[in-house]
Image: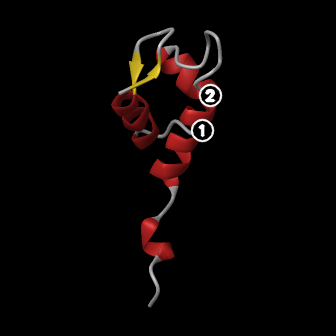
Amino acid sequence: MYVCICHHVREREVRALVRTGVRTEEAVGDACGAGTGCGSCLDRICDLIEEETTDTRLSKVA
């Protein structure tokens, strides 16, 4: 699924960037252009960063 229509960036591309250490919307934009057009994808980019950086093991009840 596309995250950024302006620059044809898919969700999997943003997730891959986050897995390599990208941590801000600005850094995603620098790397692939997402979020640098109309800006309507910035919230989704932020969500993807949060999803990829949240340690799901912490949310499990012991």
Q: Is residue 1 left or right of residue 32?
A: left
Residue ranking furthest to the bottom: 62
Dot 1 amino acid type: Cys
Task: Determine which residue is flagged by label 2.
Answer: 42
Q: Secondary structure at mark 2?
A: helix
Q: Dot 1 corresponds to which residue?
A: 46
Q: Nearer the viewer, residue 17 or 45?
A: 45
Distance in Å between CA atoms under marks 2 and 1: 6 Å
In the rendered image, residue 40, in percent from the top left (x then y), is placed at: 63, 21
Quadrant in which the C terminus appears:
bottom left
- How many residues crowd mark 1 within 10 Å: few (<14), some (14–19), many (20+)? some
Disc 2 residue type (three-letter): Leu
Q: Quadrant of residue 42?
A: top right
Q: Quadrant of residue 46?
A: top right
Q: Is residue 45 above or below residue 5?
A: below
The x, y position of residue 28, in whole percent, is 54, 26
